[in-house]
């Protein structure tokens, strides 16, 4: 079953004050089957994040279509979905993880993960149990559970981010440079996390600038160059 | 997904002044002001939907018409024209609430709306006790049982972290942040499905601001109240709102998912606003 199908997708940014228009990506085509892990590589500035952010609709897509197979809405074009539909999908179906943590101030790690569940309508007791499970699963040091994440290291923030996103059991998880700025050890940890997610049947799209870490894990790797996606130009691993 | 909005606003207009032949078509305006007759077109053709349980953010610079719009919705000010529909049971969604009698409007204010003003002086009676302020709203909503009202008030004050030993005190003795929290408790006392928050954190210091934001988020989560949050502070909007509307010179110029408005603003003014963020 095809989970996501991107057809002739393009995105351009217009900056009115500078009278400038920039074509960030164009003619992007790719598709992902359910349970697959797709890697997108490329230099910074090549437009990798633009694709991911457009799927999540943090960017407003302007060309082509992004067909997603939703449990709730069936096949839906994310370029045209209503804001309310997008909010629903973000809550229940599509997760997004970046290297940055943008959260409510003065909220502990535990509370943040619990809130993600409460927002989905889970009861407090379930949220409590599931949050602890997720924090344990992604190996965030229990000493950090009841502290604010603003002083966390990059790797700790990332693991919290992943816990917050995956605790909702998304069908599709978008990973925006999850290994950027991490040390060797933490990168291996991220790899393990992705392995676990994949084993659970989550469909994943990740962008990396150091794909070697994902060797053997990706079903397909696409290479992004100057706003275009070169299928097969990168390392392709089956399995 | 077909869902009916809880509040539908259509073509809301509010002008101060009668207009003249030069500005009738809203041509020749300087921003939203007619230099000929002095008429201010504070809200022009405002239309939007508010859905159950969501927080809708409204941003814009001072003078963009945000607060005027809130005042119109809350019946603090008469609209010049336009409609608002509240889905509060069979038949209610067809009635333009701006056309209701003042008695019916009062009913809506007392039963369906809550309002938190930027300045607590507008939302609180400063010479009543905190508990008295809440009781006032409860009485307006038809409650009469004194011990029940006291119980509700205590719960609300506790909920917004006002120590109960100070509940008989007048809010004028309180700090700005405490006053704001009493005001929120009062606005929540009639269990309104719709809550308006007008620049509620403006002027509060950062730690108090975080308290109030956390409180608002908790209210949304636990009580499922729909809210319209007006703020010129993009950080506040980012923390609270699911969807955001951008206003300029009395008109809506852009609307979208909050993170999209902040990360990929489309309109020149929104870009200016977002790119000005430190």
Image (tube, rainbow, N blue to C red):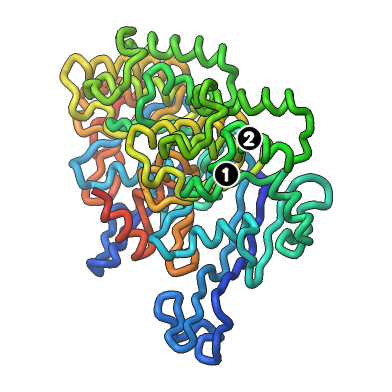
Q: Name which residue lies at 64% across and 66% down.
A: B78
Asked if B258 appears above or below B138 in the picture, the reply is below
Specify the subunit that label 2 lies on: B
Asked if B85 appears above or below A222 in the picture, the reply is below
- Where residue B136 appears, as percent x and y from the top left, is 67, 39
Q: Quadrant of residue A19?
A: bottom left
Question: Taking B83 as reference, is B269 left or right?
Answer: left
- Where residue B256 appears, as percent x and y from the top left, is 47, 52
- Where residue B95 appears, as percent x and y from the top left, is 78, 59
Badge 2 is on which residue? Answer: B132
Q: Quadrant of residue A213?
A: top left
Question: Taking A230 as reference, is B241 left or right?
Answer: right
Quadrant location of the N terminus of chain B in the rendered image: top right
User: What distance separates the C-alpha of mark 1 from that of mark 2?
Assistant: 9 Å
Q: Secondary structure at mark 1?
A: loop
Badge 1 is on which residue? Answer: B125
CB under 8 Å between discs 1 and 2: yes
Q: Name which residue lies at 52% across and 21% down.
A: B165
Q: Of A113 and B124, which appears nearest the observer? A: B124
Q: Name which residue lies at 74% across and 27% down.
A: B146
């Amino acid at each position: 079953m095809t989970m996501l199908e991107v057809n002739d997708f393009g995105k351009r940014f217009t900056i009115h004050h500078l009278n400038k228009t920039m074509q960030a990506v164009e003619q992007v085509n790719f598709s992902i089957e359910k349970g697959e892990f797709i890697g997108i590589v490329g230099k910074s500035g090549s437009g990798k994040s633009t694709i991911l952010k457009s799927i999540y609709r943090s960017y407003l897509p302007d060309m082509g279509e992004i067909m997603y197979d939703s449990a709730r809405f069936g096949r839906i074009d994310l370029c045209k979905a209503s804001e309310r539909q997008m909010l629903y999908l973000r809550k229940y179906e599509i997760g997004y993880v970046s290297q940055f943590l943008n959260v409510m101030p003065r909220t502990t790690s535990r509370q943040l993960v619990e809130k993600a569940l409460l927002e989905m309508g889970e009861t407090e007791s379930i949220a409590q149990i599931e949050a602890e499970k997720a924090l344990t699963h992604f190996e965030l040091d229990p000493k950090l559970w009841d502290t604010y994440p603003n002083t966390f290291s990059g790797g700790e923030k990332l693991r919290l981010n992943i816990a917050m996103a995956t605790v909702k059991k998304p069908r599709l998880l978008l990973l925006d440079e999850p290994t950027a700025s991490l040390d060797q050890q933490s990168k291996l940890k991220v790899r393990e996390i992705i392995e676990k997610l994949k084993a659970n049947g989550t469909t994943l799209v990740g962008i990396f600038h150091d794909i070697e870490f994902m060797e053997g894990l990706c079903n397909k790797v696409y290479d992004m160059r100057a706003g275009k996606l070169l299928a097969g130009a990168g390392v392709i691993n089956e399995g | 997904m077909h869902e009916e909005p809880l509040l539908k606003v259509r073509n809301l207009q509010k002008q101060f002044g009668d207009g003249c032949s030069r500005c009738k078509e809203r041509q020749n305006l300087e921003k939203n002001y007619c230099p000929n007759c002095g008429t201010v077109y504070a809200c022009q053709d405002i239309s939007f939907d508010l859905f159950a349980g969501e927080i809708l953010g409204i941003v814009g610079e001072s003078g963009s018409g945000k607060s005027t719009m809130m005042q119109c919705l809350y019946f603090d000010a008469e609209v010049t024209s336009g409609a608002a529909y509240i889905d509060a049971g069979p038949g209610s969604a067809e009635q333009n609430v701006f056309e209701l009698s003042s008695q019916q409007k009062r009913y809506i204010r007392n039963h369906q709306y809550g309002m938190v003003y930027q300045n607590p002086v507008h939302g609180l009676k400063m010479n009543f006790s905190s508990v008295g302020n809440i009781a006032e709203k409860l009485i307006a909503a038809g409650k009469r049982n004194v011990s029940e009202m006291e119980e509700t008030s205590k719960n609300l004050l506790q909920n917004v972290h006002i120590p109960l030993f100070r509940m008989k005190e007048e809010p004028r003795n309180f700090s700005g942040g405490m006053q704001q929290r009493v005001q929120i408790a009062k606005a929540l006392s009639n269990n309104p499905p719709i809550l308006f928050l007008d620049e509620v954190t403006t002027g509060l210091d950062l730690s108090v601001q975080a308290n109030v934001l956390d409180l608002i988020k908790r209210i949304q989560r636990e009580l499922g109240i729909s809210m319209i949050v007006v703020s010129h502070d993009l950080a506040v909007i980012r923390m609270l709102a699911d969807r955001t509307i951008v206003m300029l010179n009395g008109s809506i110029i852009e609307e979208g998912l909050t993170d999209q408005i902040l990360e990929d603003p489309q309109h020149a003014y929104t870009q200016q606003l977002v790119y000005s963020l430190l």
